[in-house]
Amino acid sequence: MTTIAVIPGDGIGPEVIGPALDVLEALGLGVRTDVLDHVNAEAYLRTGTALTGADLDRIRSGEAALLGAVGDPRLGDTPYVREVLTTLRLELDLYVNYRPARLWHDRLSPLRDPSRRAIDCVIVRENTEGLYSGIGGVTRTGSPQEVAVDVDLSTRHGVSRVLDFAFSVARRSVCLVDKANAVRNGGQLWQRCWSEAVARHPHVEASHLYVDTAALRLATDPTAFDVIVTNNSYGDILSDLTAALAGGLGVAASANLNPATGRALFEPVHGSAPDIAGTGTANPFGAILSVALLVEHLGRTEEADAVRRAVAAAVATGCVTPDLGGSLGTKEVGTAVLAKLRRP
Amino acid sequence: MTTIAVIPGDGIGPEVIGPALDVLEALGLGVRTDVLDHVNAEAYLRTGTALTGADLDRIRSGEAALLGAVGDPRLGDTPYVREVLTTLRLELDLYVNYRPARLWHDRLSPLRDPSRRAIDCVIVRENTEGLYSGIGGVTRTGSPQEVAVDVDLSTRHGVSRVLDFAFSVARRSVCLVDKANAVRNGGQLWQRCWSEAVARHPHVEASHLYVDTAALRLATDPTAFDVIVTNNSYGDILSDLTAALAGGLGVAASANLNPATGRALFEPVHGSAPDIAGTGTANPFGAILSVALLVEHLGRTEEADAVRRAVAAAVATGCVTPDLGGSLGTKEVGTAVLAKLRRP
Ligand SMILES: CC(C)[C@H](C(=O)O)[C@@H](O)C(=O)O
Ligand SMILES: CC(C)[C@H](C(=O)O)[C@@H](O)C(=O)O
């Protein structure tokens, strides 16, 4: 039997995981869930540990994992969020962060020109190195001579594999985004790996943009892009930008993948949103669409498409939360999606 | 007599510098120009050097410098562009990159919601450290074990001074943009310097966003921002994004400043645009508005405002190049701005 580890987390995390699990259940795939509801800020505040070895073992023993959101205003600047997310990404070696952005309804686009609204692209973000290497330090802390260093790490191992993944999911084209004209060392390594990857995939259109130009192009004409592959830091920034162009963080879903081992963690892109936690108005689409990605990962493409169609139908009929201009709550939107799923 | 060093550069650089110098001349400030027209890709191809010590001396002996654009497709991945721009920024210790974004006409906004179009903000980008430190290297080049490292450097000296500058130019508010939740060492140094800078400027509203959220907010509601202060890399990305929201790179002007020594270099944000070089259609507004910043730097606020009003009038009457939806060439737009300047 397929088992999914579920980490509801903090704030709106548990609120959006509810409807997402209802959708998973309604698909009738006979998936068992192993809920780790002790992985959250409360526990971290009490014990100082976010994820134990035993938690990681439970997560590893499932087919995949689903995370709501982590983060708590009481923990401010402590490494809690980073510890949960980065530990999961590194310990499971989830080297791909797959972040699709698709406009579910024309009404949701912030762009003025109708011909440039239909965004349907994917950010493939390297998820285990770059500026998230954790290497670095601070010296002379607090003195006028204080110096801090963070290492932006690129390895051929890490870069080649994420480039190959990007090509493997391309429908039309892959665009490499880097800053090889200014950040020379990693830039050159990415460029070398890129030339080789392009040669390995002669049937996919390949292009290259510097990250500043990529941000500019996305903001003016996102329809120009299919797959964008980039490093950890630029992927973080550009995926929030594409989310903005596709209706906001509320609808953004993501997968953290290791295509070699098959390990996978799915999560909405939004955080724990303490400002609206408890109000019952959090948008469940990010979590529900993360379930669609999970179901697709399990090989159930048809069911994944059914979930996406149900979300599209809910959006089209205005069954949406306030962030999308609607007046429904999290649960009502979940119910609407279930209804559309049952009677498409 | 005031002397300005002028580097027309490559591609459309000389084409846009022409009208920009005409505007400067028309202001009747009696400014002398010292044109370094040998600083370009041709010379670099011949000599392997972009900027000599003598060039730097000439630039240093002027009150300010004006640069068109550098870059040449024949030089592809060589460090030429970086050498010119980074050398100027580092040698003159121009620690502030000041990049205003103002929508000159509602028609130019890519945003759909009229209430969110009126962007009028400034990116204050740290210009001498961060990922542009030049520190790092590659080892085992070409082997499967290849590793590249680039150092993201933050110093209290560098961070404090740019934060103070940001507060000094704020009209309403300053928003710090960083990624202190993931890039911990520099992030914490910026946060420490930020707390102190906020305390030094109690009358300015201060806020903080992570860079991914900042990109998302800018793309949906840029009117929320006044001054954004950030590091070299995020400033590079976000200033192209704000340029996109204010009509594109063609209208974006910038100043590289050392407010302590008074040294300053002004340049349009666009590059040498080899694709349109020689066609006579490059937009001169970026260069002309860089002259406005230069004139303001010389203490001539009224003249700077007159230049901006002339540009606004040219835009309002459709005297614009193709990138802004018009049909005029670079020279005709320059002539139109001169006419508006003479008879406002
Ligand atoms: C050309 C490049 C090195 C440069 C930079 O990143 O600083 C440019 O993009 C800019 O913003 O002035
Ligand atoms: C919370 C933060 C560390 C995280 C990241 O930058 O990876 C988040 O922004 C994301 O994109 O998943």
Image (cartoon, coloured by chain):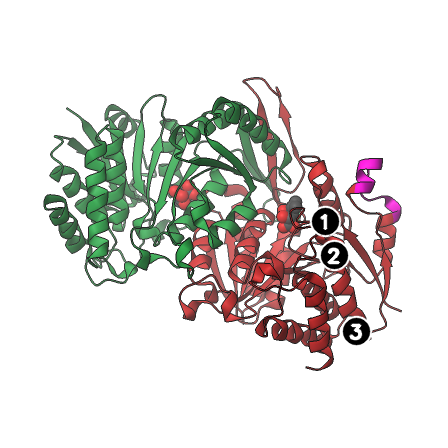
Chain colours: A red, B green
Answer yes or no: do the residues labelled 1 and 2 have beta carbons within 8 Å?
yes
Q: Give the alpha-carbon distance from disc 1 to disc 2, as whole Å.
A: 8 Å
Image location of residue A235, percent across then percent down = 57, 52
Report which residue position mark 2 lands on: A15
Label 3: few (<14), some (14–19) or many (≥20) C-alpha neighbours in 10 Å:
few
Closer to the camera in the image, A125 or A340: A340
Report which residue position mark 3 lands on: A26
Image location of residue B238, percent across then percent down = 46, 46
Q: Residue furthest bottom?
A: A343
Helix, strand or loop status at disc 1: loop
* Residue A196 falls left or right of residue B240: right
In the rendering, which numbered label is found on residue A11?
1
Q: Residue B212 in magenta? A: no
Residue pictured at 50% horizontal, 28% vertical? B159
Q: Give the alpha-carbon distance from disc 1 to disc 3, as whole Å.
A: 25 Å
Label 1: few (<14), some (14–19) or many (≥20) C-alpha neighbours in 10 Å:
many
Label 1 marks which chain's residue?
A
Helix, strand or loop status at disc 3: helix
Asked if A302 appears above or below B333 in the picture, the reply is: below
- Which of marks 3 and 1 precedes in the sequence? 1
Label 2: few (<14), some (14–19) or many (≥20) C-alpha neighbours in 10 Å:
many
Q: Give the alpha-carbon distance from disc 3 to disc 2, as whole Å.
A: 18 Å
Snapshot quadrant of residue A78: top right
Snapshot quadrant of residue A203: bottom right
Helix, strand or loop status at disc 2: helix
Q: Which residues are magenta?
A: A42-54
Q: Residue A48 in magenta? A: yes
Q: Amino acid at mark 1?
A: Gly
User: Are marks 1 and 2 in one subunit?
Assistant: yes
Quadrant observed for ligand 1 in the rendered image: top left
Closer to the camera in the image, A192 or B223: B223
User: Are marks 3 and 2 in one subunit?
Assistant: yes
